[in-house]
């Protein structure tokens, strides 16, 4: 997939002040979506491109107190995708008509956006004291009675 650049335009992390005796976190929600597709002409003699705007959001809900959230992280960015003029015309036309991208392209674009956004979201979460937006690997102690070869 000819993605030539991924740029983050805006990042925001907020941890709310919760005034309660008991705070019970709930599941966090991760959401990513394509916000807009804009044509980028004259990328080369044979190629054209599009700028695909995306938004990645993480919301930290609370079970208690109800109707409050612990915080949120927002990452906005853009991906520059290039292809032949005909292929780019198809992408732009499909977006203008249905606000959708062809499934194979959509998967590649969203994966690229998520990879970049999740790294930034982990950093932002650490800065404001929120849990990581995605589970990070962790080590567990070895169970008693098992021996490992050296």
Image (tube, grey):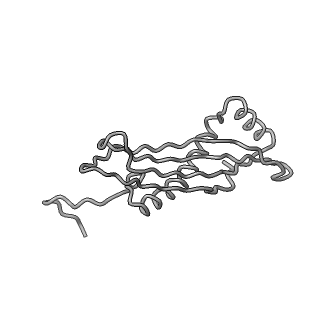
Residue 48 horizontal side relative to residue 12, left or right? right
Residue 22 screen position, x and y as percent: 24, 49
Residue 6 screen position, x and y as percent: 64, 55
Residue 83 drawn above or below residue 147? above
Nearer to us in this view, 45 or 37: 37
Residue 92 horizontal side relative to residue 22, left or right? right
Q: Residue at x 46, y 44 (%)?
A: 30
Nearer to us in this view, 118 or 81: 118
Residue 56 screen position, x and y as percent: 53, 47
Q: Residue furthest front?
A: 19
Nearer to us in this view, 100 or 82: 100
Q: Residue at x 49, y 54 (%)?
A: 118
Residue 67 screen position, x and y as percent: 36, 39
Residue 81 horizontal side relative to residue 11, left or right? right
Q: Residue furthest top?
A: 97
Give the quadrant of the C terminus. bottom left
């Amino acid at each position: 997939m000819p993605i030539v650049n991924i740029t983050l335009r805006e990042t925001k992390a907020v941890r709310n002040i919760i005034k309660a005796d008991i705070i019970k976190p709930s599941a966090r929600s991760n959401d990513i979506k394509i916000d807009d597709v804009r044509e980028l002409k004259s990328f080369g003699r044979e190629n054209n491109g599009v700028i695909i705007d995306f938004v990645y959001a993480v919301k930290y809900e609370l079970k208690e107190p109800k109707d409050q959230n612990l915080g949120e992280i927002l990452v906005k960015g853009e991906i520059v995708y290039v292809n032949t003029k005909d292929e780019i015309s198809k992408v732009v036309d499909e977006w203008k008509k249905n606000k959708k991208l062809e499934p194979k392209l959509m998967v590649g674009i969203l994966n690229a956006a998520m990879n970049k956004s999740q790294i930034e979201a982990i950093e932002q979460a650490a800065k404001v004291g929120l849990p990581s937006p995605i589970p990070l690997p962790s080590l567990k102690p070895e169970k008693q009675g098992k021996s490992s070869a050296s």
